Structures are given as structure tokens and as C-alpha cells.
Amino acid sequence: MWIQPDRTPAAPHFSCTKPTSVGPRLALRVDFCRRSAISSPKPLQLILARQLASSLAMPIIIVDTLGTLIYYNEPAEVILAQRFEETGEMPANEWGAAFAVTDEDRQPIAHEKWPLVIAITQQKPISRIIWLRSPDGHWRHINWTSVPFIAQGGEFLGVQSIFWEVA
Amino acid sequence: MEVTLWGTRGSLATPGPETARYGGNTACIGVRGREGTILVLDAGTGIRRLGTSLPAKLERVDVMLTHLHMDHVQGLGFFAPLYRAGVNVHIWGPASATMGLQERLKRYLSPPLFPVHLSELPCNATFHAIPNGEVEIGEFRVTADLICHPGPTVGYRVTDGQGKVMTFMPDHEPALGNPHFPNMPFEWTSGAHLAANADLLIHDSQYSSQEYWDHCGWGHSSLAQAINFGRLCEIRRLSTFHHDPNHNDADLDKLIADAIEETHPPFEVVPGCEGSVFNL
């Protein structure tokens, strides 16, 4: 037990008595059909990534370690043809099925070779120019860049994908 | 548990008659459990008085640093148990990708900034990179996780054997430029899981709502943001903390009253005054 410090005159305690109200299926080699724990606390790094993405003009999606789409910004809503406010988080087999992806010769790219999937499974950054068909049927010529988030302790936290439209 | 505020000032020690009531010492709080476990959270200049008040037969004390900014470590070299042979002093702090905790602290606790080398201290000092997750220290379960502040910074959630919870986030900017804060879901708010349903939240409340926008990104919160963060986390009591050096006692009385008027918190707001004691 320590000796209590000298008490200085206390400032008034404030309290408020007025109550306020508290307030087509993918078969990827990563276990994409497992659903992440929706509503689990997000690592600070992902919180900061979301805040940054929400202020940028490039389409950005963020997935967790299982590939669950946990956030996409407003520019990415065009590519996904859905609003994040309406979809919320989506497991990989759900959002992945919305796309078709081909190489520049219009040959389909297998799911496991998608930059996002490589960034998850191999935890390395990758960039590739592809053609991407959105759910609205629109084909876009895209430089798809995916970067894994690695925490200071070496923990893999998820992946950020950026979709640069090729001029 | 008993929680004592030994230093509540942010950024820079600010002694003087105009700050006597809220106090001029920088961040340091003591937590004492019913079985005698003692935790010291942050080592600002307030730690000097705390150190002199510890029992002579002290065997172990744990100093848990939220981060290594100067106002949170400046008092460490004046912490009496460091100079007592046989006392086990465990120092915890956030991990770095490039350098251990002891090496980082040595930058300050060595010449020319400080006359004594860490390695020369007579106590048994042990340094721990705090893991994200839980550690058991005596009768306390301490949960730590990174929170939004420049550089590696953690918040601490201390739970005692009776299930009482005190959360300490002296430097924290969960709003980070969001004018609509806290409009994000709970799980997307920095530190929310650490503060959830806390019996006492000691939280950064450095600025007025107007001042915040001139300091956005500096890692601190306004009083209104601290209250709204507490509302989101459904806490039971908030103690304001990390007072701006430019705010004297009269300023702080008014700023806190204004913030309460602005936000109507559904919990008690206790101005963080040096010397205040909370029994949970």
C-alpha cells in the first residue's frame, strides 16, 4: 500500500442525469469459405487503412486473413456495383463470384492466381494488369495491385487491393 | 482496485499556481489491488512521488508504458525502486520492429541525456515487449493492444479478480480527422474493445472541440470526442486526462463543462486531477 498523495482541492465532479441512448462459388486454395468473425474488433492497422482508403479516389478493397471483404471505399463501389453500406462485410466466395478476371489476352485467370489471393496465400505484394468484369457486366482494364499488411510483430493481418484503371 | 492519478498533464510538465488543482506532473497512474499487486501505468514526472510512497519492503513492481514519448517516460529515471537492490522492477512497453524496449529506453536513460546508465541500476530490472493480448500480473489481468497515436502506442485494460475494469488510454485519437466521430461501428473504432463497459476509463481529452482541428493527426482527442468514445463503449465513468499545458485550472473547468453541455454523457465525468483516487 502506498501513502496517498496530498489532496488538492478537487475540481467539481460533473455528471449528467439525462439519459442518452448509448448509445458462382469460389474454390480457392485458401480456406475462403470460412467466414471471419464478423464484428470482431479490427486491428489498428486495418482501422487506419480503412480511414485512409475512405479519403482516396483510387478504388480500394480490404480483406482480412481469410479473404473476407471487410471494407471497400466509394470508388470501389463502382467496380463491385454495390454500396458497402448495403452489403457490409462479405465472405470471399460471395464477393469473388461477382467477378470474372482475364489476362490481357482475355484468357481466364484462375482464382489462385488473382493478385489478391497470392497476397493472402504467399503474403507478398504483387501487381498484374488484367481485364476485370464487374457484376454490372462492364469490362475494365485494370492494374490490380495487392499488398499484404504485416504487423510489427510479423503477424499477417490482411490485404489491401488497389484497382488502377489502365488508361 | 484502487487507482490513483499521480500525473495528469500532457506533453510537458506544467507546474505553477494556475495549474495546482489539476496538477502539473505528466502522465502516471498507480493501480493497487486488494492482494497488494502494484501496477504503475506510464512513467511521466508523476512517477517520482509515486515511487517515494511505495512500501519499504517492496518486492516487485510493474511499470507499464503506453508508449515512449517523453512525457510518458521522463520520470522513469527518478523512480525510487530502480535504485533499491533486490527489488524486481518489470518494465513493459510496446514492441518495435527494429529495436528492443531496453535499447529504446537507453536512448534517454544514458549520457548525455541522463547521468546513469540503465545497466548500472541496482534493482533487478526486466524489460518486456508487451504482447497484443493478455498478461497476468499478480491479481490483475492486463489486456493491451495498439491504439491510434503516432508511433507504437498501446492502451491498457486492467481487470481485477472481482471483474472490475479500468482502462487507460492517455494518448489516443480514435476520431483521426473524422468530423462525424463516432459514426463508425464499435469494432472499427480504435481501442473500443479495450474500453468496453469499463468501470473507469481514463482517456486523452487534451483539446476543446475547436482546438482539435488545429491539431488533427497529433494523436490526441477533444473532450467531446473522449465523451463520445465513452458513450460508444458504454463505460460507467470517465476521467479526463492528458490536459494541455496551455490550459490552466479555470480553463479546464470551463472546457469540461462546455463538453458536457455539448455531448450530454450518460455517465459520470470526473475531471482528472492529480491526487484523485478511485476505488473500484
Image (tube, helix red, strand yellow):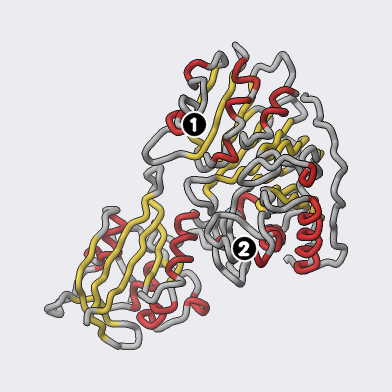
B109 vs B157, nearest the viewer:
B109
Q: Is residue A69 left or right of residue B180?
A: left
What x and y, as percent, mark residue B183? Answer: 61, 70
- Marking on residue B212: 2
Looking at the rendered structure, whether the residues under marks 1 and 2 are on a common chain is answered as yes
Q: Which residue is mark 1?
A: B108
Image point 83% across, 32% down: which residue? A6
The answer to whether residue B137 shows anywhere in this view is yes
Q: Is residue A125 left or right of residue B108?
A: left
Which chain contains the residue that carries disc 1? Answer: B
Image point 59% across, 22% down: which residue? B89
Classify mark 2: helix, strand or loop. helix
What x and y, as percent, mark residue B98? Answer: 37, 38
Q: Quadrant of the N terminus of chain A?
A: top right
Which chain contains the residue that carries disc 2? Answer: B
B136 vs B148, nearest the viewer:
B148
Residue A52, by quadrant, is bottom left
What x and y, as percent, mark residue B263? Answer: 75, 67
Which three-letter amino acid code belongs to the residue tagged 1? Tyr
